[in-house]
Image (cartoon, coloured by chain):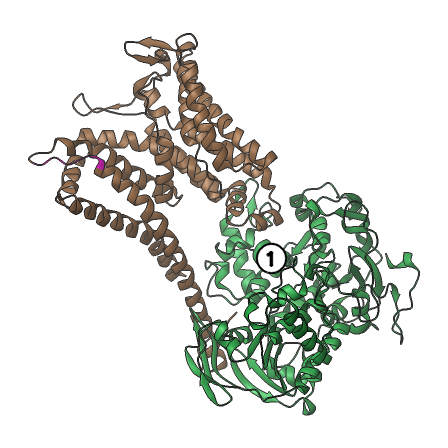
Amino acid sequence: MKKFDKERVLLAVAGPVIALVAAIVLTSVVLIASGKNPIEPYTLMLQQASFSDVQVLIINQASMYYLAALAVAVGFRMNLFNIGVDGQYRLAAMTTAVVGANVALPSFLQIPMLLIVAMLTGAFWAGAAGVLKVTRGVSEVVSTIMLNAIATSLIGYLTLADVWGVQLGNNMTTGTMSASGWVPGINLGTEVGEIYGLVFLAVAMGVLYWVVLNRTRFGFDLRATGESESAAAASGVDAKKMVLTAMLISGAVAGLSGLPLLLGDAHTYSLSFPTGLGFTGITIALLGRNNPVGIAFAALLIAFLDKASPALDYATPVAYEKEIATIMQGLIVFAVVISYEAVRQWGLRRQQKRVGAELAAAAAQINSEKKKEVAAR
Amino acid sequence: MELAGITKRFPGVVANHDIHLTVRKGTVHALVGENGAGKSTLMKILYGMQKPDEGTIAIHGEQVAFGSPADAIVRGIGMVHQHFMLADNLTVLENVVLGSEKLHGIGAAARKKIKEISDRYGLGVRPDLLVEDLGVADRQRVEILKVLFRGATTLILDEPTAVLVPQEVDALFDNLRELKAEGLSVIFISHKLGEVLSVADDITVIRRGTTVGTAVPAETTPRQLAEMMVGSELPTPETAESTVTDRPVLEVRGLTVHASGGASLGAESEPAAGGLTEFAGAGDVKRVLDDVSFTIHAGEVMGIAGVEGNGQTELIDALIGLKKADSGTITFLGEDVSSWPTRKRREQGVGYIPEDRHRHGLLLEAPLWENRILGHVTERPNAKGFWLDPKGAQADTRRIVEEYDVRTPGIDVTAASLSGGNQQKLIVGREMSHNPKFLIAAHPTRGVDVGAQAQIWDQIRAARREGLAVLLISADLDELIGLSDTLRVIYNGRLVADADPATITPEELGSAMTGAASGHLEHVETTEEAGPEGEAR
């Protein structure tokens, strides 16, 4: 039994490690091809990571990536591809900012209320895709991509000055939120910066994700649907209800992913609010194999690439383009998809072989047969 | 043709090991073995679809190596697959010439050639019919003709009788004798021993991937052959004394399901050798289940016989709740469950052994203990209220593995790594562990080795003694007759006939499966004697 556990760890680690090594090697190839030093950018970036202010940036960024990736992972676990996390979190952040600017409850009510507003908005936007899929059979891939575009236009409209927008210098914002809705962070001094308070929410969501999926009946149904829709249906899972529920949960988690920044630092939704979290979240969910711990490492890695790379532009004596990090992220996606599938198949074959061998050995013992083979199934 | 020392390895298993086979010209050579013994792999090697790792193939004394089926065809080897490879919307002529247009063109010459082959071997193929209008047996003859058209002198037939009813089997065997008389060789793969003994000139038995012996049909009984196949004593599916009570468990009244999206019935039934039976006017919507009524009592096994695709799948789906009935009621233990969702039905004691275990019974890439939860996620020991109970499920999986003799090194391996028989034993163990009151057993021993088959039969019998009601759907007529207390025949979505398993023979049942007989089937010389229609349903 122990052997299989070791086996599983090996398989779980082999995929990401192979993918990362491949991505680094390929990035170096790109560097060599463009006549640059293929090693130095990494050392420069690693050096960056040793600075505590960069570390804080990485952790803050990773918390947002983590939530976005969890949202994607919920969908992945039942074969739903929610590409719409991007639109869901942006719309949710904007709505939350507007509500936060116009409602002023005491903190202990205001903050939970804002979290709920964000989750409901995200769930609503994802739910639209869910309803379309359940009632009309529209692929969620198509509908969520379209909903992303609609969200962009909708946000553009709602932040117009004559709707909810507030002009602030050159920037169009939604007005500053009531201070009771600000989530205090951990201040490590002005030199270093502040860790968002909602980083802990991200951690809690990771735990919740694991518990729900692995320790509840609902989670089992969800995973069963993802592994085999027909088997899940025969076991009594209502596939349509499951699709809708999963989309709603995915959207709700997506709705949270902009909040660490919004409630911790920005306090308003503006043109400079980050975009693309949802897409990065897909990369991270893939890299982390939909596993809460794996996603955490993946989120930290991608956040590291994000936050350590700008320094490349100012490196002396030789500057590098910070887009190296982008190239690497892209290569990671490729490598991940290929290496995971390869490792999965290799693992299945390996296990089949091992089970066959162990059974044959047992049979040989019992029957004292000379042959140590099992017939083909 | 001669094969010597053929060995083929796949990852983890040796499919064929040191196979020796000699086929004489002008004979029917049967290759028998259990499911999974390695017959199909051997045939794929012969037909050039796979290359052997070791061993040689010689034809007329000349050693050959096949890189692809095309090479095999050049050498005069043709294969008729178990699943036909015909284009439904083309005519017989078009199907035959497809891919070998160079041989005789696509026009009059080809037609003449087809006629000639058909007449010579008594195949009775009409070149201008659309394939979609043909029944199973006719399609098979087209497949055989296709192979002959390409100049085959050795035909490989992979389980040709699996889709046929007994009367059609006899017709096929007549065709095979014609082929043999013309000097062709036939390799006939089967695990139905009676058939093998009646048609073959030589028999080679395969067990666990290797040839364990040859037999001469005239000097061998089915039982001896079976024991060679299995390598041990042979089980029979006979039930002991009746345990049927008068307490109804499941009552189905007027159950009707319409075809969704105009999908066809799948394999259509072949009119029996005698006459052409037209499908009764289907009306506007095709009814895949038409006014089906029956009652199953506690302790009763009701068997349903029928050629596949006559509504069995729809019946199972309607009973388990995967398909909504368009009309009719299903009453389970006195309660109308027609509107219950699948989960509620299963919680209330409907067990389900699905016909396709990979699609409906297992999560192949999940560990065994998670598969033990599947279908019973709301019940103990798998869950405590809202929460899963992995420890409980794992402990119970160990018990099932022990009690039901599931051969596995542990409960953390994936279901995919078990053999078919062991997967099935796990499913049976899981379903029986929840004390079902009604069990849907669809092909419970399909693709299962003989040892596991006996165990599964024993378990069904044991549960039946304790008052379980069972709906048994099977393509294995011996299994149906042996296990059932009552028998019904499904044809074209209707229960057309019933029979007493104590007296009925597979041939008589087969006749009803083609729609040729209906009503109550009596074991008499002529089975055409139709009883009152009402009694049949």
The image shows residue A270, relative to residue B495, as above or below, that is above
| Disc 1: which residue | B430
Extreme-right residue of the structure: B532
Asked if one can make out residue A370 in the rendered structure from this viewpoint, the answer is no
Give the x, y percent position of residue A323: 22, 35
Q: Which residues are magenta?
A: A318-323
Quadrant in which the C terminus of chain B appears: bottom right
A365 in magenta = no
Residue A277 against residue B524 in the figure, above or below: above
User: How would you classify the magenta stretch by its main secondary structure?
Assistant: loop
Asked which secondary structure carries label 1, the reply is: helix
In the image, residue A325 sits, relative to residue B500, either above or below, namely above
In the displayed structure image, the side of residue A26 where residue B369 appears, left or right: right
* Residue at 70% across, 74% down: B115
Colour applied to chain A: brown
Q: Is residue B28 visible?
A: yes
Q: Chain of mark 1?
A: B
Say which of B112 and A133 sits in front.
Answer: B112
The chain letter of the green chain reads B
Q: Amino acid at mark 1?
A: Arg
Does A322 appear in magenta? yes
* Residue B157 figure quarter: bottom right
Residue B85, x across and y down, in percent? 60, 64
Furthest residue to the top? A162
Q: Dot 1 surroundings within 10 Å: few (below 14), some, or many (20 or more)? A: many
Choose between A209 and B2: the one closer to the eye: B2
Q: Residue at x 79, y 73 (%)?
A: B507
Q: How far across and down, in percent of the image, does residue B420 sit?
A: 56, 65
